[in-house]
Structures are given as C-alpha cells and as structure tokens.
Amino acid sequence: MANTSQKHKNFVAEPMGDKAVTELAGVGEVLGDRLAKAGFDQACVVLGQFLILKRNQELFKEWMKDTCSANSKQAMDCWQCLDDWCGEFL
Amino acid sequence: MNNIDIDSLSDAELRTKLIEYGFPIMPITATTRQVMKKKLSLLIENKNRVGSTDGRRSLGRYSSEEETDDEVKAIKIQKNRRVTMAAPTSSTTIKPVGKFISNPEVGTSSPNIESRRSVTTNKSSTRTSRILKNARDAFDTGSESESDVIASELSEPMDISLKYEDTYNDLPNTRRSTPIRSSLYSPIKSSDHSFAATKNVSFASPSSRYSTSYTESSSALPGSLASNYAAEALSSIRTRTPTACYTTVSPASTRSSIDLNPNDTPFLSNFTKRLSVLSSNKKTDYDSQNDLVKEHDTNGSTMFGARSYLANFRATRGRDPIYNYKSRGNDSGKGSFVSYAVLVVAALFFIILAIVYLGMRSDTSMITSGYISPICNFHDPQNKKGINCINEDQVQNAINLLNSIRPELHKKAVAHRCVDPTIKPQMSEAEIVSFCQSNYGIKDAVMIRNDLKNLEVLLFSNPGWGVRLAQTENNDVAVTEDNLAKNMETAIFNLDKKVTSLVFLNPDVPYSCQVYNYVTKALYTILLIAGIFGILFLLRYSFKKFRTYEKKQKDEVNSIVDKILDLLQNAAQEEPGYVVINHARDAILDIKDRQAKRKFWEKAVQSIIENESRVRLEVQTVQGESFEVWRWIGSANLSMTGEEIGTKYRPGRRIVDVDYFTNKAFKFPHKNCKTPEVYIKCEIREGCFSTYILECKQCLEQHTVHSEDPESDLLDVNLAFVGGMSKIASNSGLYQMNELCSFMHIPTISGENFENSWKKIKEYPETKTAVTPKVIEKAETTILPLDYDEKMKTFLQELEKDIGVVEVLTQDQRNAELWFQERKKRLTASNFGRIIKLRDTTNREKVVNNLLFSTFKGNFATKYGQDNEPNAIKDFEQMTGKIVKKSGLIIHKDHPFLAASPDGLIVKENALVEVKCPYKAQNSTIEEAVNKGEITYVTYEDGKLTLKRQHEYYYQVQGQLHVTGKTHCYFVVWTPKGLAFEMIQSDDDCWDRMFDKLEKFYFDHMLPEILRNV
C-alpha cells in the first residue's frame, strides 16, 4: 500500500501497550464494539489471533469477517497494520 | 466429503485433514476453528474439481486403447516405464484398472517430438504383425498412442517389441521413407527375429557412430535385444526427423539370443554415455533402462519378464541413483587423498631442505683459502707495507692467527647478542696477545703483534670474513658499527689514541637465540601497540565520561529551569505576580547545595533569560531595594471571562508578523525525524500577541514561536490595536474593539489588558510609534474590566436589541450574512431537537463546537431541499389557497437567546409553514416513500400525514411555534410527485419540557463558549 492512514501510522509508530482494539487501523467504533464483545477488547489480543493465524493474510481477513463482519478493506487494513507493527516491533 | 463432515470433526481431525490436503499446520483454537473449517472445505472443493478432471483424463485414456487383452501384471512395469521413459511434461497418473496407458495430453498437445515406446508381448507370433500394423497406423494418423505391454509368463514365447516412435510434424516425410520401412519390417515377419532401425535422414548416414554400432550389433547378433535411442531422438529435435522403429522379436526357440554378447556392450556404453549428456532427471530415468538391459545380460531371457520388472521397480525406487552417487563420492575421496599425500611429501621435502641448508651455514669454519692477500710489491710505489700490503711470507701466519682467535671472537659476539649485552664482543689487541699467549703457549708477544698488524691489513681487504677492525676511546664499552675503522691508515693514525680491537659484528647466532630475539622484539612491538591502544581507549573513555558529565550538567540545569518555571507559574497567580531572582534561588536550592550548585544556577538563569519568552525580566522595588525579578507573562490573564485561561489553540485569525513567524517556525529543531508533523500544541495569548508552542508529533520536540518579534521597533500589537481603535472614533472602546474582532474572527484583547494598553498608549512617546495616540486623551472612556456576568449581561442586552430589524433583514435567510451572524449567537429551532435528545453522557462541548464552528456547508441533500422549497410552498399555496410569505430570523421576545427561521408564515392566519423536501424520496409519492422507508419521520395512513411526536422535527416545529408565538404550524412534506401536510397545534406542555433543557444548555454550555469567542 502506497498510502496508509493516519491511524495506521500512529499504530505502527509505537509499541501497542494496552491500546484499545479501536486503535487498530480498519477497526472503528462499531467493529471495535463487536470485537470487544467477542472477547477481543485490546489490540494485543487481536495481535495474538493474528499471530495464531501465522500472519496469514487470507486467514486473518477471513477471521475478521467472521468475528466482526468486517468488510474486505477493513480486514485488509487491520491485517496490514498488524503486519507492519510486527515488522517493526516483533 | 462435504461440509457436514467438517463441522463434526474434532480439532485434531481437522488438523490432520488439513495436513492431508497439504495445508501448513496451524493451531486450531476456538477462534481459529471457523476459519480453518472454511479453508478445509475450500480445499476439498478444489481437490474434487481436480479429481474430476483426472477421472476424465483416465477415461479417455481407457477408451483410446484397443488391443490390451492380456497382461494385467504389466501395469506396474508400465508405470515404471512411464516414469522412466515419458517425456518430462507427461503426467503419470495411473488408473488402477487400465491395462494400457496412453498419454493423451502429450499426444494431442505437443506435435513436435515425443518418444514413444511400446513393448508388446504376445502369446503368439501372429500378434506381431498386428502391432506393426498398429504402428503403421500410428504413423498414418499421427496419433501417438503408446502401448506398453509385457508378458510375465515365462513359458510362453515372447515377442518383445520395443518400439520407439519418434513422430514429427513432418509426416509426409515419414511416409516417403516407406521403402526402407518395409524392408525393415519384412524380416520381422519372415523370421520373427530381427533388429531393425529406421532412420529417415541422418540415421542412415554412415558417419553416424550409432548407425555403425547398430550395424555391428545386428550383424554380430541379429535378434538380440534392441534398445532405442530416445536420447538420440531428443537431441535431433531441431535438425532431423528420424523415425526409428526397432522391433525385437525373440521367439522361444532362440531364447538364448536375448543374452547380450560383448558386441552389444559398446552399443550400450555408447547409449549410456549419450544419456549422461542429458539432463539429470532424464539420466536417472534412462539409468533404470540401462539397468533393465543389464538384467538381460546376466539372467537371460528366461527371467526376463520378472527381472525387468524387478529392475525397473528398483530403479524407480531410486536405488540406482543412490548407488551412483555413492560410487562417485568414493572416487572423489580417493583422488583427493592422493593429491594430499603428494602435497604433504613435497612440503616435508622442502622443510628438510631448509633445515639442511640452515644447518650448513656456519661462519666459524676455518679459513684456509679464497681470500685476497695484498702482497707487497716493491716495484709499486703505492704499496706501503703494513698499511695496504703485507709480505707474502707473513700471510700464512696472519691467517693462522685469525683462525685461532676467530672462534673466540664469534663466541664473544654471540654471547654479547644473546646472553648478556654487557659482555664485550670485541677483543682488543692486548687481549688477543694475552689470549694467544695463554691458550697457545706462544711466548713471543712481538711476533703476535706483528701477525696481528698483518691480519688487520688483511681484514680490510677481506670483508667477507666478518671480522672487522674497530677503534674505541677505551675498552669499556661494546663496539658498534660507528666505531669501525675505515681503512688501515686511519687505524694506524689513531693507534695511539684509541684502543684497537677486532670484532665479529654480525655473527650467526644460534636458533634459540634468534627465536628469543624475535620473540622479545615481537613482545616489545605488541606492548607498544597495546600501549597505544590503551591510550586511545583511555581517551575515548574519558571523552565519554566527559560527555555524560556534560549531559548531567545540562540535565541539572534543565531541572532547575523547570523548577523556576513552576515557581513562577505559581507565583503568577498570587500577588505581586513576580519573583525576585534571588528568592527563587533560595526556594529552589537547598542552603547546603547553594554554593556547590552556583554554576548550575547561573546557567539556568542565563538560559531563562535567553530562551524563555514566557518569563520577563523586570526591575522591581521590593522593600525599598531594587531587585531583578521574573514575571510570568505566559499565563497573564488572557480571558475576558475571567476563567482560568485555556492555552488551547482556538481557530480563527491572528495578527501576525508573517516574515518573523514563518522564519521562526521553520527553525523547528527536529530530532532526526523523517516525517515532521508539527502542530500547535498550545497558544498563549496576550491580547493580540500570541506565543505558540509547536510540537512535532513524530519526535515530540517542542518549539516556541511568537506571533511577532517581541523586540521589534514597531509598537506592540496590543498597544497598536488599542491606539488604532481610539483613533477611529473618539468614543470607541473595548466593546467596539470586541465587535470588530468578532467580525474579523480575531481573538480579542481582555478587558484588563485593554485597560493596561490604554494607559500605556497614553504615556507612550509619540516619536517612537507609527500611531500617534494623541486623540486618546479626549476619548477617555471608563472601561472597566468585565467579569463574566457583566459580559453576559451586555451580550444578552445586545441580543434583545433590534429583534424586529433582524427579522426583516434576514428574510433571505441563507443569502443574508446577518442571518448567519445572529444565528450564531442563539439557539435556533432547527437545533432544538438535537439538544433535547442529547443524552446526559454526551459531551456538550463537542455539540457546542459543532453548532458554533461547524464547517458544514451543505451537501446535495440540503441543496435539493433548498432548491425545492419554493416549489413546495407554491404547491402548498395552490392546494390550500393560503398565501405564504417569507420569514426572517424570528427571535423569542422574552428569551432572546432562542430564535427560529420558519420556512414561511401564513398571511392572515396565526400560523407558519415548515417544509420538508426529502432527497431520498425524490422519485416516490409520499405514500410510497413512507412505505419504502425513505421517509421515516412521518406516518401516512389513509391520506393522512402524521409527524412522529418523538422526532426531532416535532421539537423543531414546537420550537418554531413558541418562538414565533403562532398557534399552529403546517408541516409539509413534499416530493416531486406529491405533497402532504399536517396541521400541528402548539403544545405548551411539550414546550415547557423543552424550554428547561434549552435554557440550561444555552447558559451552561453555549453562552460561555460564545462569550469566549466574541
């Protein structure tokens, strides 16, 4: 992706600490709410899932769609965001 | 396999299934299970699709074969053959029941060359002709079906026909060669025992070594096993179009003929060689074929079927290749061992040579010949005896003397070098004499001296001996290179003054000594280097220390600065608002540390004076003495409302010295930050003068910028503003100024500040300013600092003014600037619904900001509404016969903070009109739109429109009714296809409820914000 959102930049810029799940790119209030209801209340929990799926884009997107009915773009943004973060900090 | 299966799978089963389908192992957890199930079903689906195409292919394969009657067992061979022989592109899927396998994919898709092999074993020899026919058919049709059948029944007569068909595009060419071919085939028919090769072009050429070998083998052993030249065929893809068809028929009667005799071997080796040129995978393939041939070789025809089967099987299981690798590995090992051995031997030889050579070197050997002896010639006037020549008879004596003292000299020199440098290497003349006397028992010292003199002369002419003549002041120190005598004449010249001695200057020292010397030298060097490095390291370390020390000092200074700023900020809130510098020091530094930290303190003071714009240095009289004091001007009372100043940046215009400001702003000190994102973190306003603290989001560095140069020659902006205002009109003051500022959208000067400026401008020396504040004297007004209540009062009074005028002036609504202006100061009916419906938890500040500073300029929907409003009103007028007139902004008579701008007023009726033109419903009638959910705020039943009582629009209507004081309102919903309206009566209960909320909202939240920005 040539351009990333401000949210993406912010997220990737620093360790995630205990950021809320809504800090993830592609996850807004609605998705964040759904994720939180599914037990994924923090960004790091989503990261865990991301890692369990071995950073696989396809599977992670599928999971996002399943869990919080994200659309393709949101899921992709979120995946990209986590992947970049991992590239930076993992 | 279907999805139901997948659902019921356990985690472990799911995982195994996934692995089965070639999917990498993933953890299956509660959260991933769903995804994995999907993946699996997808994989299964894919697999099924692939499987079905496979099935089709094998079916086609099945139907294409015609003559596979017998030989079920041959299938495995078939398979192996297939693996070994097929062109690399061919797929090798086996249909279990297929007795006969062709490769339609290859056969149909690649028209150039494919090597085809068909081994057909028949129970009867009559079969052969059929095969041949079949083969011919294959030529004719160009189809490349392959038949590969082998009989395993050993008792039966076997017709093994290995057939290689290299079929090319050029079929006519093939046909042209029919004569040759028929000649080939005929022997088969006649004798059932032949070896035949067909080659259209190049195979027939005698120069081909393969053809030669063919001839050989066929002549030597007709009817032996024939192998094909798949490799040959492959290599000749571009150049030739051969059709080779070898048929071997070995009848039962001549079973032995299958044995290969030696004549076949070159053929085979050729074959193998040829194959080895090919690519590696082909090679292994062909190796197995070779293996097959070998089996023939050793076991004969009786075992042929079974053996070949075995051999092939083995080959395909990859044993042959493994064996090959092994043997290759052994070979290379052996070769390298030999070369290593040679190397070692050579190295040993040279080492020994070196040792021998070094051992042979010795200078202590006797000198008997090979020297130059300058014999005195009496005829030569140049010769001076004892100086550059000696008598011939004395030469031998001198040499003898040299030989006797030489070992002693050598010993001494070595001892000097190795054992103890204090031992003198030289022997003085006296020492030599006494040495000779004591060791050799020669009594005659004069003779010795004489010989010695001669020897000295000889030494000069024979520098190769290594013994030199040296002359020193005394015999206490070891001689060096400098002491050597240059020639005999100087030696004789100095004979009396100096001690003459012989010395072995460069002796061959023993190895141990040499090694010792080297080691000590190396040690010295290492020590030296280590010393240098040590010094460098020390330097670096001390530099580092120095840096950390410096940093520590800086930190110390910074912490003091921070403390000072804290102190000043606290002090600013109390009287007298400033802090004497010395007092600040006393407050911050402990009395004990005061002396020690004096330096830091001075630095901190310096840094505050230089870098801190929020602190002003003044001289104040404190208790009768003048002190330098600091005043915190950063937090001067900026707000007119008297509230604690917010340093939040407020959008709006500023009066800025652009040149100065941009210059300063561009000097932002980024800390290695690639994508600077500077924003205004806060703004400290002092009237029109602002100080901005910029911060970079990336590097978090901060930077302070003023709106103008504080040390500029120009009049201070506040003073200038106030002065300017007073000049415009004699009675203008704070209020007028605020009015101006609010129009300009400039944050204005606080009352207090205004007064200060006012006073200052009056005292200001006229000469220095561009503004002459002369008029001000006249225009002295009684501006008092306004507190919030007063400000509010003024504002509310202002709101009450000109209510009627505003209404008339704003009848154009959106087109009238005043409409926007007045709306900004009040709550308007269109927002009532929103405010009523606010939840308690909603942040009021945001709502207020939205209302006051909304940047919403309208969109297609609002535009649609605005454009169609006149149409709607026209339709409404036609429908009802009422006359609607425009309305401006109507302000509540008792509560001037409430206002409404109805869409229209009904003439001659105490009513108003509110029109809605829903954009969504632009293609529907009202009824359709309501049913479709395009309009949600009304119900529509039996042609009767009803506005939902809980909807924001209802509050808007009620608000309009009460603000305007009308009794009822026609709520009109209009679409291009229809119009409906409801007459809504004014509802006092509803209004009472609404009013409380509105009032609370306005005074608690909106008014402060308005006042802050006025």
Image (cartoon, coloured by chain):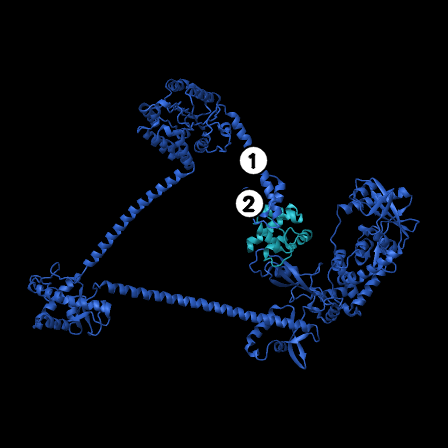
The front one of B544 and B354 is B354
Residue found 80% across the figure and 70% down from its top: B782
* Side of B284 where B371 appears, left or right: left
* Side of B363 where B611 appears, left or right: right
- Look at the numbered discs 1 and 2 and tell me whether their residues touch, using CB distance below 8 Å: no
Amino acid type at image mark 1: Val
Pointer 1 or 2: first along the chain? 2
User: What chain does badge 1 belong to?
Assistant: B
Q: Which residue is mark 2?
A: B16
Crowding at dot 2, Cα within 10 Å, few <14 / some 14-19 / many 20+, comes out as some
* Side of B593 where A27 appears, left or right: right
- Chain letter for blue, please: B
Answer with the quarter of the image where residue B383 lies: bottom left
**Chain A is which colour?**
cyan
Residue A19's x, y, as percent?
63, 58
Q: How much space separates mark 1 and mark 2, taking CA atoms?
A: 21 Å
Could you confirm whether marks 1 and 2 are on the same chain? yes
* Side of B460 where B87 appears, left or right: right
Please tell me whether mark 2 sits on a helix, a strand or a loop. Answer: helix
Please tell me whether mark 1 sits on a helix, a strand or a loop. Answer: helix
Answer with the quarter of the image where residue B316 lies: top left
Name the disc covering residue B883, or none: none
Q: Which residue is mark 1?
A: B50
